[in-house]
Amino acid sequence: MGEISDGFIEAVTLIVTLNPEILEIAGRSLYVSVAATLVAALVAIPLGALIYYYDFRGKRAVINIVQTLYALPTVIVGLLVYLLVSYSGPLGSLNLLYTTNAMIIAQVILVSPLIIGFTVAGLTGLDKEMKYTTLALNARAYRALLTLVREAKFAILSAVVLAFGRAIAEVGAVMMVGGNIRHFTRTLTTAITLNTSMGDFAMSIALGIILLTIALIVNLGVNVLQHYNGRVKDE
Amino acid sequence: MSEDILTVRGLAKSYSKKEVVRPLDLSVKKGEILAIIGPSGAGKSTLMRMMDTIEPPSQGEMCIFGEPVTKHSVHRIRGRMGMLFQKTVLFDRTVAENVELGLSYRHLPKIERGERVAAILEHMGLSRFAERGARTLSGGEGQRISFARVLVTRPEILFLDEPTANLDPVSTRILEEMIIRENRENKTTIIINTHDQAQGQRLADRIAVMMDGTFVQIGSADEVFYHPISGKVAKFVGIQNIFTGHVRDGEVVSSQVSFCQVPGSLAGNVQIMLRAEDIALSKTGITGDRRSVSGVVISSARSGAFLEVSVNAGCLFTVIVPFRQTGDVYAPGERVWIGWRSDVVHVIPDTS
């Protein structure tokens, strides 16, 4: 018991004294996950919108696959990206292995299905007359989609926030392709893993508190967005 | 009324083997108002979306503004048409931004867009709403804004898909007046779907009856409402007295009631149709050149300003009389006389 309570006290001290190593790790975690979420959103929202907009053979199957990928195991993504960027892999010449960029790539792959799927769902949730209206007003496909995505913005934004939550909390993929290298690729999750195995509970608890706080803020953000989404629907 | 502005040949639509619209033909003249009436699920909305080119047909061809609709011409053609839906669609922006949407899709300069939006709102008496959030409007106001959003693009053909189905009677009247005004002022060709046969009668030059995915009758309001081509159409256009009968000695007869002389060369079994409001009702007897029979009142019920009386006179007749003017009460069991002019009886061969 003493170890845990001591750990807590020390952890709080580390946080309030703005321990430089903790700040560095938290900052890197935020950077990697924010970057990954933004890149994923830039790719996945348009992709989801296109899947929604066009009727094509196998559309249902595509949506099912995307939804299955919500639960994509992080270590599988880690393995995939490792094989891609390792020195003998197809992207080996870019020297990405054990860099933050490799971690970003892994997280982009990890969270894109989530954003694609929720974008499709959010747009499908709109009245179908809305799509008809944009068409009847003679909108080209991209203008119609801009209008409709804007209309489904709360649903899509909450998907993006959820994606960020999944990105910042995962440990498997960033550990495999980032390598948990101090001052280079160490993030909140990989640092907790390492420090716990080394018995440095104070550091782990401090990092854990920060991670939990971020998760809390993310959850709060999703709630606010879904409140707005619900309000739009009600009217 | 001059040349055909829209022609449709063999147009049909199926969704995974289910035929929603069966191959049909249609021609619409420039400046005309055509009402498509029919029960829910008859395929009216699907047909309309195909004609507005926002839903591809499974088969058939269309020629609009004298030009065949193809992959290359469709965008240009659609730009000269507009469509209003039963369900009011308002985007989560201001009223002015909603109305501007079609113009911004057409890449019109900002200043012209603003002017045209202001002008149409002014014209329709909606200026006071311009800066309101569109979602804050009532149902009737919202549908008028949706209509303004279509009209501001100056469509030459206007498709209205049950535009008043969700509106209260006052809002319905206002929108109907706007529809007629658009047709009169701009010679806009209008095609309107409605399940409300009276609305079809109020607005349209010509009425097409759609049932089970295809047109069963196209004609003037008089033709459709007084000379329906089948019992099914007759029922839909509100003819309450439909009897099966036969021709005997030059008379059309059903259950001993003689309705009229045989029109034309009909023979054998027939269907006899008589509008409830074309039948006179009396407690003392019917005079003049009417056919009349006596019968017994089965029931009577108020329906708005009218009284609907069921009379058993061999056939079971439904009669509608104005309520206030008569002030009479028709009690079940009472003996009454009913009568009609023989020229209001519509007789068709019974093919069933």
Image: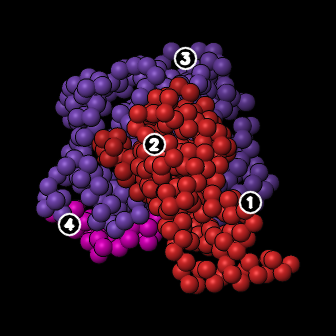
Chain colours: A red, B purple
Please name the residue shown 64% across and 39% down the image. Answer: A76
- The residue depicted at 25 percent of the width and 65 percent of the height is B121
Secondary structure beneath disc 1?
A: helix
Residue A200: x percent and y percent?
71, 69
Which element type, helix, strand or loop, lies under badge 3?
loop
Q: Residues within 10 Å of mark 1 (few under 14, many from 20)?
A: few
Label of residue B118 in the image = 4
Q: Are marks 4 and 2 on the same chain?
A: no
Q: Amino acid at mark 3?
A: Leu
Q: Residues within 10 Å of mark 2 (few under 14, many from 20)?
A: many
Q: CA distance from mark 4 to mark 1?
A: 70 Å
Disc 4 secondary structure class? helix
Disc 3 with disc 4 on a shared chain: yes
Q: Chain of mark 1?
A: A
Looking at the rendered image, the quarter that the N terminus of chain B falls into is top left
Secondary structure of the residue carrying numbered label 2: loop
Report the Cα–Cα distance between label 1 and label 3: 100 Å
Residue closer to the observer: B90 or B184: B90
N-term mark: 2 or 1: 2
**Tag shown at residue B47:** none
Indicate the amino acid at tag 2.
Leu
Disc 1 vs disc 3: Cβ atoms closer than 8 Å?
no
Q: Nearer the viewer, mark 2 or mark 3?
A: 2
**Tag 3 residue:** B266
User: If the image is split into quadrants, where does the C terminus of chain B sit?
Assistant: top right
Q: Which residues are magenta?
A: B115-140
Q: Is residue A218 magenta?
A: no
